[in-house]
Amino acid sequence: MTPSSPRRKRLDADSEKTRGRVVDALRRGPKTLDELVEALELTRTAIRLQLTSLERDGLVAHGGVRPSRTKPANVYELTVEAEQGLSRAYVPVLTQLLHVLSARMSKTDFDNVMRSVGRELMADQPRPPGDLRQRAEAASELLNQLGGLTEIDDSDALVIRSHGCPLAATAVDHPETCNAMESLVSEFVGAPVRQRCDRAGRPKCRFVIPSEA
């Protein structure tokens, strides 16, 4: 039986559904394994598998213990990262905020603010060691952690290319968003960086680090 068989797909869909139910239950408050079994009417094995997977992904953590009929039971709760990841408010709020700021500020002031945002995002971040290429690779990994899908291209100049844009929702209407990321990358690698992002259609990031840097 191949991995793409209908049965395999059905099992994956059932597992994903169970995972979602466990997350929804934990959003209502921390729970023990027995409490999840009672609330969801699923087997201990099924829920334990999902808790293990969610812990591995950093979405669930132990929140202490709670007395039970036999021995203290572990309490499970969603992590802050999981709660933030479930929110759908960030993109529309950020997009509207940029619309308001751009309408009330001059283009120069708005651009300066966005560049300051990019620089100050690095205020508490340790800078990577190594030569310029190594620091560019570290910057590529940082962008990946922020939701990009980047790689280094040094066929001509040293370039960080992305197959998408983690801020695509705002970059199309506000190119200053790309300037914020330019400042972030420049601050991180400790060298001048020029953004040459493609904002047509599906936006793609592109940061050029001149060889003279």
Image (cartoon, helix red, strand yellow):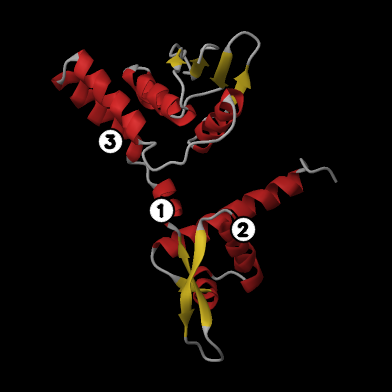
What residue is shown at x 56% (from left), y 91% (from top)? 70
**Marks 2 and 1: in contact by CB < 8 Å?**
no
Q: Secondary structure at mark 3?
A: helix
At mark 1, the secondary structure is helix
Mark 3 or mark 1, earlier in chain? 1
Q: Residue type at mark 2: give it.
A: Ser
Choose the circle earlier in sequence order: 3 or 2.
2
Instruction: Count the numbered circles shown.
Output: 3
Question: What's the amino acid at mark 3?
Answer: Val
- Residue 54 drawn at (x, y percent): 57, 58
Residue with the mark numbered 2: 53
Measured from the top left, where is residue 60 in percent x and y?
51, 61
Q: Nearer the viewer, residue 187 or 92?
A: 187
**Mark 3: few/some/many CA within 10 Å (<14, 14-19, 20+):** few
Question: Dot 2: what SS?
Answer: helix
Residue 204 horizontal/vertical position (percent): 50, 19
The CA distance from mark 1 to mark 2 is 16 Å
Q: Along the horizontal axis of the image, is 52 left or right of 96?
A: right
Would you say residue 179 is visible in this rendering? yes
Mark 3–mark 2 Cα distance, whole angstroms, equals 31 Å
Q: Could you classify mark 2 by the number of other residues whose Cα lies within 10 Å: few (under 14), some (14-19), or many (20 or more)?
A: some
How far is disc 3 from disc 1 in space, using C-alphas? 17 Å
Residue 140 % position (x, y) = 55, 29
> What crowding class fits label 1: few (fewer than 14 Cα within 10 Å), some (14-19), or many (20 or more)?
few
**In the image, 104: left or right of 184?**
left
Provide the residue designation for mark 1.
83
What residue would you read off at disc 3? 93
Which amino acid, by three-letter code, is at mark 1? Answer: Glu
